[in-house]
Every structure is written in structure tokens, then in C-alpha cells.
Image (tube, rainbow, N blue to C red):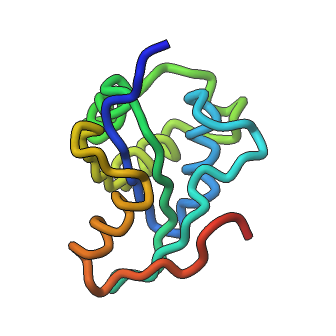
Amino acid sequence: MSTPTHSLLATVPAALHDKANKLAHALGYQPEDGDTFSIRLDTPDGEKAAFIQFVMPSFIALLAAGKTGTYPLLDWPSFGLSEEDVAGVMTAIDADTRSVDARLSLEEHMAAFLAERPRWAVQVAGRE
């Protein structure tokens, strides 16, 4: 098994929380009833849902491709999503990546991310 090379903190508007979780499930990154986007952030632009984890470059590439409208061809309706839902979530994801070489733990990545955004704050950590 390969060792992850980056930590990734991804945010979406809170209104897309459920669709983002369905997308994570469809892509094989969470169980069907999981809550990948379980961190709630208060931001000047409103509430956002976020997740943070160690990832491989292939996942970062998948997110980058999604920003341009390129994403895997899956049976999206079987996951409760339309192609429009997928496109909306993929373009809304804001991803912050840090190299594992920086030796940051996920907690340190979150702290650095928030330090760069002084008006953002964790609202609720963990599942509700």
C-alpha cells in the first residue's frame, strides 16, 4: 500500500454537505452512512463543511479535474446524485493541500489553515 504524500483540507458550503458526502461515498472514500464532511466552520461567507485527511496525489488530481468538469463516469443516480449535483459539488470544493514532507499532523494542518484565515473558526468538531 502506498504512503499518502499530502494532507488535504477540503471545504464546501454547508448547503452542499449532504451531496458532498454522497460524492465521497460514490468515489469510494467513505461508507454509505459516513460523514466525511463532519467539521463545521464559521466563515465570513457563511457556514462551511470540511474534512481533513492524508491523501495520495491521485485524489488531488481528481479534485483538480473536477474543477474543470472532468470527473469519473459513474452511475450517479444510484448514489442519489445527478450529474449536475456532481458538477456543483466538484466546482464548489475548496482544497488546501500540504506536503507530508512538512511533517504536519492533521491537527497542525487545521491550525495553520485557520491561522491563515483569522475570521474563520471551527463551529462544531466531529459528528453531530
Q: Nearer the viewer, residue 122 or 63?
A: 122
Residue 100 appears at what percent x and percent y?
29, 38
Q: Nearer the viewer, residue 50 or 2?
A: 2
Residue 104 appears at what percent x and percent y?
32, 50
Is residue 53 left or right of 118 when viewed as pictured? right
Q: Residue at x 53, y 60 (%)?
A: 16
Q: Would you identify the image quadrant in which residue 92 lies? A: bottom left
Q: Nearer the viewer, residue 15 or 8?
A: 8
- Vertical side of 73 occupied by 68: above or below: below
Single out the residue that lies furthest toward the front: 103
Number of numbered callouts drawn: 0
Q: Quadrant of the C terminus?
A: bottom right
Single out the residue that lies furthest toward the right: 33
- Vertical side of 92 occupied by 63: above or below: above
Q: Nearer the viewer, residue 55 or 24?
A: 55
Q: Residue at x 67, y 33 (%)?
A: 77
Q: Residue at x 43, y 50 (%)?
A: 88
Is residue 126 left or right of 72 when viewed as pictured? right
Residue 65 appears at what percent x and percent y?
28, 31
Residue 32 appears at what percent x and percent y?
75, 38
- Vertical side of 110 occupied by 84: above or below: above
Single out the residue that lies furthest toward the top: 1
Is residue 111 left or right of 27 when viewed as pictured? left
- Vertical side of 34 occupied by 18: above or below: below
Is residue 16 left or right of 58 when viewed as pictured? right
